[in-house]
Amino acid sequence: MNKGDLIVELAKLYPNFNKHDIGVMVDTFFDSIVEALARGERVELRGFGTFGVKERQGRTARNPRSGQIVTVPAKRVPFFRVAKELRAEVNKQAFPGTGPEVRNTES
């Protein structure tokens, strides 16, 4: 699913909004997350996951093609950690009957 598909799905669920307005809402949502991460904040969406930023220290590395030693500067890298609820739902749909609600009744 891409952003356009998301907008189409939301338009089906909320027919009182036109696609343009939904597109603006989706863009605003993503822009808000990006701006919070740029400020170094964490964004937590309960039941979905957490977006955050990790600090990577500068280091020296080797270019695998030329073998030359290069300096890699320090940087901030965004990451996403999946919530337990989302992970469980994905696994339940991918592998029905294998979740924690299924108990082994063999003795």
Image (cartoon, rainbow, N blue to C red):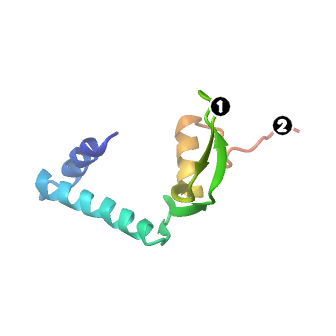
The part of the image, by quadrant, that contains residue 32 is bottom left
- On the image, the x and y values in percent for residue 73 come to 56, 55
**Which disc is residue 8 wearing?**
none
Q: How many residues crowd around disc 2 within 10 Å: few (fewer than 14), some, or many (20 or more)?
A: few
Q: How many residues crowd around disc 1 within 10 Å: few (fewer than 14), some, or many (20 or more)?
A: few
Mark 1 secondary-structure assignment: loop
Q: Earlier in the sequence, mark 1 or mark 2?
A: 1
Q: Is residue 70 left or right of residue 2?
A: right
Front position in the image: 8 or 39: 39
Q: How many marks?
A: 2
Position of the C terminus, as image quadrant, is top right
The part of the image, by quadrant, that contains residue 70 is top right
In this figure, which residue is indicated by the disc labeled 1?
67
Could you tell me which residue is drawn at 62 percent across and 57 percent down? Answer: 58
Amino acid type of the residue that numbered disc 2 sits on in the rendered structure: Glu
In this figure, which residue is indicated by the disc labeled 2?
106
Determine whether label 1 and label 2 are within 8 Å by CB: no
Circle 1 or circle 2, nearest the eye? 1
Task: Tell me: residue 49, above or below residue 102.
Answer: below
Q: What is the residue that sits farthest to the top in this orientation?
A: 65
- On the image, the x and y values in percent for residue 8 come to 21, 44
Could you tell me which residue is drawn at 57 percent across and 42 percent down? Answer: 92
Front position in the image: 33 or 89: 33
What whole-number distance in Å separates the C-alpha atoms at marks 1 and 2? 59 Å
Front position in the image: 50 or 65: 65
Mark 2 secondary-structure assignment: loop
- On the image, the x and y values in percent for residue 38 come to 42, 67
The part of the image, by quadrant, that contains residue 26 is bottom left
- On the image, the x and y values in percent for residue 60 come to 66, 48
Q: What is the residue that sits farthest to the right in this orientation?
A: 107
Could you tell me which residue is drawn at 18 percent across and 56 percent down? Answer: 22
Amino acid type of the residue that numbered disc 1 sits on in the rendered structure: Gly
